[in-house]
Image: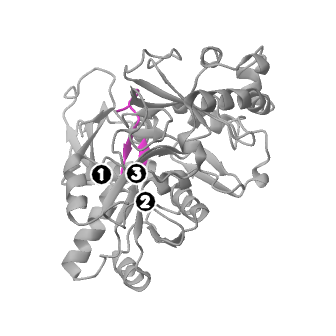
Amino acid sequence: MDANPERPAMTAHYDALDTREPAAREAELFARLPGVLRSAMSAPAYAERLKGIDPASVTSRTALAGLPVLRKSELPALHKASQPFGGFVAAAPGSFARLFTSPGPIFEPEGRQADPWRGARALFAAGFRPEDIVLNTFSYHLTPGGFIFDASARALGCAVIPAGPGNTEQQFELIEAFRPVGYSGTPDFLKILLDAAATAGRDVSSIKRALVSGAAFPPSLQAEIRARGIDAYQAFGTADLGLIAFETEARDGMVVNEDLIMEIVRPGTGDPVSPGDVGEIVVTSLDPHHPWIRLALGDLTAALPGSSKCGRTNMRIKGWMGRADQTTKVKGMFVRPEQVAEIGKRHPALGRLRLVVTRQGEADAMTLKAEANTSGDALREEIAASLRAVTKLGGAVELVSPGALPNDGKVIADER
């Protein structure tokens, strides 16, 4: 038995899939893949991209690696050209349960099946159990983050407080009334909530565990959250795919979720890297209603050897190790080079632009450096308004003289 009853025993698993033989998992995934490919090719964009491919022949990683990669960075332009899903979804929008947008824009549907984002397994690994009450602080407004964790917690049998971010005073009232044991949200907002509660003398001590995602969770913040009595785990996911990989109590990397085929490829190609090498994450999902075939996420990681000490046998990765392109994530939201270019279009008198992403304390922050012939508060405020309108995030603006920024093509510099 675990000495701490509030933490799951390391032998506790969500179901038998967690611990099956890796060869059996691989065989089952690739037995399903041809049918998923046939479903994908009923959508016009996949039919064009996969023209000449015989789905029945794609039954191994070698065969899968021969299919073209679809880069997530391509999706905004493709979605604008062929709404709402860029031609990659054959099903009608009305056949889904919910419809979302993410910055880009990229449009995402939520399936009607139980646990459509595959997150219950990750919550279970983080110690969440049926009938736990979970405070979910991811946003429920237009983007899927809030619903990803909401649906996943309810699929596990938890009750969910749909708090969203902000409004800490109201959140304190809900926490003191319902005494949630779990938290889901960004690690930044968890710290904000805990700090505000300490300042206001509010009781949030019921929260004992957390599943965090959407922002950096550096060791310093991990230690602070742990010191406040909360056992926090990280999950890696996207608005397109849901939960992709997650930490377990073993704390030895992230275990890849079931029903996904993950490849790690050399950035800019579709070629798998050698075992242990850092490369770009490429994911194929096996939902026939909304499949993704070799979606390259732009995120870097490396595979770890062997199986987790917790007994789960799926592939393990080191976690998020940076971006293969300049797209980055700030406060849980992707910021893309195309968005920086849009700000430049709105202010044609500006020269080069560079968005610098840093950490201030334990929170993400960004500063847009802009070359300009003139300066002044009015211009800075106009550019700051454009920055917020385009990225949906606030940030500082620093005006610099023409030629001050390097001529290296970099428009987003992640310095965290």
When the figure is inspected, residue 251 is found, relative to residue 183, above or below; the finding is above
Mark 3 surroundings within 10 Å by alpha-carbon count, few (fewer than 14), some (14 through 19), many (20 or more): some
Q: Which residues are magenta?
A: 322-335
Question: Percent position (x, y) of residue 123?
Answer: 48, 56
List the residue tagged with mark 1: 395
Using a 10 Å C-alpha cutoff, classify the residue at mark 1 as few (fewer than 14 neighbours), some (14 to 19) or many (20 or more): many
Element on which disc 1 rests = loop
Q: Amino acid at mark 1?
A: Gly
- Number of the label disc, if any, that sits on residue 127: 2
Question: Cβ–Cβ below 8 Å for labels 2 and 1?
Answer: no
Marks 2 and 3, the one that precedes in the sequence: 3
Q: Nearer the viewer, residue 33 or 82?
A: 33
- Mark 2 and mark 3 in contact? Answer it, CB < 8 Å: no
Q: Find residue 10 and name its label.
A: 3
Quarter placement of the C terminus: top left
In this rendering, the answer to whether 165 lies above or below 262 is below
Instruction: Indicate left or right for 84 with 207 as reference.
Output: right
Kindly tell me whether residue 240 is visible in this rendering.
no
| Mark positioned earlier in the residue sequence (1 or 3) | 3
Question: In x, y percent, where is residue 43?
Answer: 77, 33
Q: Tell me the quarter of the picture where residue 398 sits.
A: top left
Query: Which residue is nearer to you in this view: 253 or 215?
Result: 253
**Residue occupying the far front of the picture:** 1
Q: Nearer the viewer, mark 2 or mark 3?
A: 3
Q: Determine the secondary structure under disc 2.
A: loop
Give the Cα separation between the discs numbered 1 and 3.
42 Å
Amino acid carrying label 3: it is Met
Give the residue displayed 70% in from the left and 35% down from the top.
88
Q: Earlier in the sequence, mark 2 or mark 1?
A: 2
